[in-house]
Image: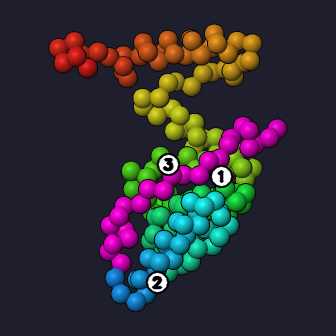
Amino acid sequence: YDLKQIAPVRPAPVAIPIGDLLTWRGGEADAGRSTLISAFAAYQKGAYVEAARRFAGVAASDPGSYQAAFYGGVALLMADRPGEAVAALERAKSLGGPAERDETQWYLGLALVHAGELTRGRELLDGLCAAKGAPPLRSEAYEADRLNEQLDDQARIFINDENNNFFDLMHRV
């Protein structure tokens, strides 16, 4: 089977709080900010090997940088180096807060799957898919000849789930 078709990887959109770039001041800090900006520039151009190298430089000088760990890990995954991506994304998972948790876990799960750690990767991805507000996971695999029927059934189950979907007539929401 082809993992690139089963579990395709797309680059994470760049989202960095502007304060992370503005709070660096003076000598080494200016060099660190410049390296971070150049890492993001390489990442956005699709030069993932170069971006990973630059993010690693930022991480070496600022071990607490979530952005360096996360985007460095995604860059490694995009550069088809999933084993190295796992280490960087695990570091990002330990550095990130609740706002970054799901995205970090998603890319870590993909990296694990692509690194051949299918069970561990699937556990992370299944956990995200089973999160509150997501449709329940099916107990059977989707089949091409029954796909429309299975998707209709899944949609019906999700829409009728009163824990996640309801209409408040008074407030019209």
SS type, badge 1:
helix
Q: Quadrant of residue 43?
A: bottom right
Residue 122 versus residue 163 in the image, above or below? below
Which residue: 74% across, 18% down? 144
SS type, badge 2:
helix
Q: Is residue 78 magenta?
A: no
Q: Which residue is mark 3?
A: 103
SS type, badge 3:
helix
Which residue: 39% across, 50% down? 99
Disc ID at residue 111: 1
Crowd rating for badge 2 (residues with CA inside 10 Å; few <14, some 14–19, many 20+): some
Q: Amino acid at mark 3?
A: Glu
Does residue 85 appear anywhere in the picture? no
Q: Which residue is mark 2?
A: 31
Q: Range of the magenta residues?
A: 1-24
Residue 154 appears at what percent x and percent y? 55, 16
Q: The C terminus appears in which quarter of the rendering?
A: top left
Verify CB contact (< 8 Å) between mark 1 and mark 2. Answer: no
Earlier sequence position, callout 3 versus callout 1: 3
**Distance from the alpha carbon under mark 3 to that under mark 2:** 28 Å
Residue 156 appears at what percent x and percent y? 50, 11
Q: Amino acid at mark 1?
A: Ala
Front: mark 1 or 2? 2
Please, which residue is most extreme toward the left here? 170
Earlier sequence position, callout 3 versus callout 2: 2
**Distance from the alpha carbon under mark 3 to that under mark 1:** 12 Å
Which residue: 82% across, 38% down? 1
